[in-house]
């Protein structure tokens, strides 16, 4: 049972344009969401996060939007740069159930930014 | 470098052999996690330590797997009698009470295991 879903395995955008990566979740107990970026042969690198009490969080070129009623979040990258090309993972955690902050990940979306 | 480190980065072994991986966390982090990532999948949780106590284990962690974190510092993950299905990237992540965001985890570079 996939509790965090990233339905687009890949996305290709032109440099300077907006990249929008989507993520859906099914577990209503999730209360914190994170985006990680991963290059080949490296571990995931934390990018940006959002608490369930907010609907938007912005950090430079990266903005995450959360729609709790739809159980949907998205990561916007503006403007996209070739160095942003990587696999992006959506992750969620639930502390209320005593889950020790473990992360549940989606399968990832490969973003390619073309010069 | 004060990040999470893992050793070895790559391990090739024959089926039936035992392997052990090591993770050195960021020094002030008391929480330590092991995840496993297979091709085309996101990382999947294996086990969690708070200081030296192993507080949670996933159903994915069969009895051939054992993890330790003596003295609440580095951690080891051992796989006994390896099987081809154990081939994966094994990731260590840490987090700390003192960090500004308790939910964030910082990942090491991973150990890629290949079982022949």
Image: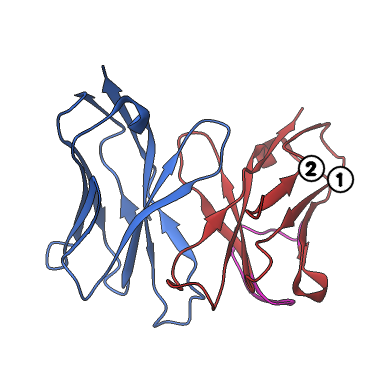
Chain colours: A blue, B red
Res A3 seen here: no
In the rendered structure, the answer to whether residue A15 lies left or right of residue A94 reads: left
Q: Can residue A54 be seen by looking at this rendering? A: yes
Q: Is residue A12 above or below residue B39?
A: above
Residue that mark 1 sits on: B18
Question: Mark 2 vs mark 1: same chain?
Answer: yes
Residue drawn at (46%, 62%) of the image: A103
> Which of B1/A47 is in front?
B1
Residue A8 locus on image (x, y percent): 26, 36
Name the mark on residue B82. 2
Identify the residue at horizontal 39%, vertical 43% (top origin). Answer: A107
Q: Which numbered disc flags the more N-terminal residue, 2 or 1? A: 1
On the image, the x and y values in percent for residue A64 come to 22, 55
Taking depth in this image into account, of A77 and B21 the one nearest to the observer is: A77
- Res. A6 image quadrant: top left
Label 1 lies in what chain?
Answer: B
x then y, percent, for residue B43: 51, 49
Q: Please state the extent of the stretch shown in magenta in the rendering.
A: B49-66
Position of residue A9 relative to residue A3, above or below, is: above
Tell whether A80 sits left or right of B17: left
Q: Mark 1 falls on what kind of element?
A: loop
Q: In the displayed structure, would residue B20 be above or below residue B103?
A: above
Residue B54 drawn above or below residue A18: below
């Amino acid at each position: 049972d996939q509790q965090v879903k990233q339905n687009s395995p890949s996305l290709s955008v032109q440099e300077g344009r907006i990249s929008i990566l989507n993520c859906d979740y099914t577990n209503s107990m999730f209360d914190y969401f994170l985006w990680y970026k991963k290059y080949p042969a490296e571990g995931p690198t934390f990018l940006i996060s959002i608490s369930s009490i907010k609907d938007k969080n912005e950090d430079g070129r990266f903005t995450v939007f959360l729609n709790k009623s739809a159980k949907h979040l998205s990561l916007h990258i503006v403007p996209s740069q070739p160095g942003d090309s990587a696999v992006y993972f959506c992750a969620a955690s639930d502390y209320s159930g005593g889950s020790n902050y473990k992360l549940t990940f989606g399968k990832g979306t490969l973003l390619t930014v073309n010069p | 470098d004060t990040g999470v480190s893992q050793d070895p980065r790559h391990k090739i072994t024959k089926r039936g052999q035992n392997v052990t991986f090591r993770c050195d966390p960021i020094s002030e982090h008391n929480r330590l996690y092991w995840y496993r990532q297979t091709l085309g999948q996101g990382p999947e949780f294996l086990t969690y330590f708070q200081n030296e106590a192993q507080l949670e284990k996933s159903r994915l962690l069969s009895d051939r797997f054992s993890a330790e974190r003596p003295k609440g510092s580095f951690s080891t993950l051992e796989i006994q009698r390896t099987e081809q299905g154990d081939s994966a990237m094994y990731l260590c992540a840490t987090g700390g009470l003192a960090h500004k965001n308790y939910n964030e985890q910082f990942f090491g570079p991973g150990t890629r295991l290949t079982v022949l």
